[in-house]
Amino acid sequence: MENLKALLKENNVPFELIDHDIAIRTAQEGAAYFEINVGQTAPTLILKTDKGFFALIMSGDRGHVDFDEVASILGCKKVKLAGAREVEKVTGCTVGSISMVGHNLPCIIDKRLSQYSNIYGGSGKATCTLKINPSALVKLNKIIATLE
């Protein structure tokens, strides 16, 4: 958590880390807990492809991942969600708590997130949510593609 705070402060990114008693595991849970639009939730999913691992930061209102679309965007033959052990090995985080920034993976970002002044997503800790402006995702991540 200290590394995340340092990264955000070093890059002059306004942020809020919001502690909560329960782990928030889905976009719907996050929207209900924070009383926000489900589209403001930004789960970070780790994808395993034939070209390596990627982070997909998507709007919670998208509902599901279109793996064929992602494969086409990345020029990959195979795309699937990374397994829990792979996620932990690659990010140091458990599934459901992956930080939106600071994981050093190439990223695909959902354009839908840019319509909001603030988005809510993982901080690396299941009982803490990171609230940031979506422009910070571009500033702090290696964005290689976008979802329309």
Image: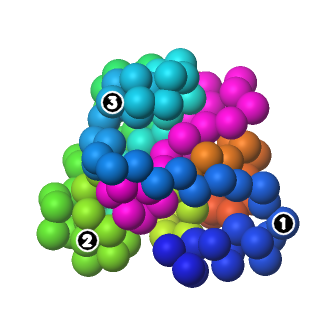
Instruction: Check disc 2 and report its element: helix, strand or loop.
Output: helix
Q: Amino acid at mark 3?
A: Glu
Percent of width and height locating residue 69: 40, 31
What residue sits 63% from the left and 62% below the top?
Answer: 141
In this picture, which residue range is highlighted in magenta? 109-129
Rounded to the nearest angstrom, the CA distance separating label 1 from label 2 is: 28 Å
Instruction: Check disc 3 and report its element: helix, strand or loop.
Output: helix
Q: In screen coordinates, is 125 left or right of 95?
A: right
Crowding near pointer 1: few (<14 within 10 Å), some, many (20+)?
few
Vertical relation: 19 (above or below) 94: above
Find disc 1 in the rendering and name its residue: 12
What residue sits 54% from the left and 23% below the top?
Answer: 36
Q: Amino acid at mark 1?
A: Asn
What residue sits 36% from the left and 55% below the top?
Answer: 127
Q: In screen coordinates, is 66 left or right of 132?
A: left
Looking at the image, tell me whether mark 2 or mark 3 is earlier in sequence order: 3
Q: In screen coordinates, is 133 left or right of 39?
A: right
Find disc 3 in the rendering and name its residue: 29
Q: Using the image as rendered, state which of residue 9 and residue 63 is in the foreground.
A: 9
What residue sits 26% from the left and 63% below the top?
Answer: 94
- Quarter that holds the C terminus: top right
Rounded to the nearest angstrom, the CA distance separating label 3 from label 1 is: 29 Å
Instruction: Check disc 1 and report its element: helix, strand or loop.
Output: loop
Within the image, what quadrant is residue 17 found in?
bottom right
Find disc 2 in the rendering and name its residue: 88
In this view, the residue farthest toward the right is 12
